[in-house]
Amino acid sequence: MSIEIRDTEGHGARLEVAPGPAEGPLQVSLLIESPSAGASWSCSPAAARELAAALVEAAAEAEARRSAEPVTVKARELRRGDVREGDRLMTVEAVRTDGADVQVTWTSGGGRSWSQLYGADADIRLRSRRAPGR
């Protein structure tokens, strides 16, 4: 099976997945070729199934995030993994409630973290919501 893929800058490559050779250990072969480079791997059929399942899950999450409308929640309802609506990526790392206040620790896409204090009833607009228990 051959699939055309693109990186974030739009450069194309070809991903080829095939059963490994008939002799030797049971393997699945993966080959990625682009005009500038190539790489190949092999793995067990079980690992190939795990990779396929991970790709399916990531695709579903990406589609859900893209299609989901932003949601507004009260600061006291924030959960680890929630992503703030806005120009910059801000993810909830931790939430601590102290009476009428909520201290939220945010992490940026660049790895910087900081804490902010909100009233428990403050409205926070989220780009995406992490599912409970995940």
Image (cartoon, rainbow, N blue to C red):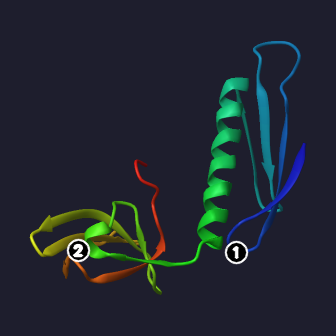
Task: Give percent across and percent down for residue 102.
Answer: 18, 72
Q: Residue furthest top?
A: 24
Task: Give percent across and percent down for residue 42.
Answer: 72, 31
Q: Is residue 53 left or right of residue 98?
A: right
Residue 125 visible at all: yes
Q: Is residue 108 left or right of residue 119?
A: right
Sequence-first tag of 2 and 1: 1
In three-dimensional space, the C-alpha distance between marks 2 and 1, rounded to whole angstroms, equals 31 Å
Task: Give the residue type that dot 1 points to.
Answer: Glu
Q: Quadrant of residue 46?
A: top right
**Residue at the spot of label 1:** 9
Quadrant where the N terminus lies? Answer: top right
Q: Nearer the viewer, residue 38 or 93?
A: 93
Task: Give the residue type that dot 2 points to.
Answer: Trp
At mark 1, the secondary structure is loop
Task: Give percent across and percent down for residue 117.
Answer: 17, 79
Residue at left offset 69%, top offset 48%: 56
Q: Is residue 55 left or right of residue 90?
A: right
Query: Alpha-carbon neighbours of circle 2 within 10 Å: few (<14), some, or many (≥20)?
Result: few
Give the number of callouts: 2
Residue at left offset 77%, top offset 17%: 26
Q: Nearer the viewer, residue 123 or 111?
A: 123
Name the disc covering residue 114, or none.
2
Task: Give percent across and percent down for residue 18.
Answer: 86, 34
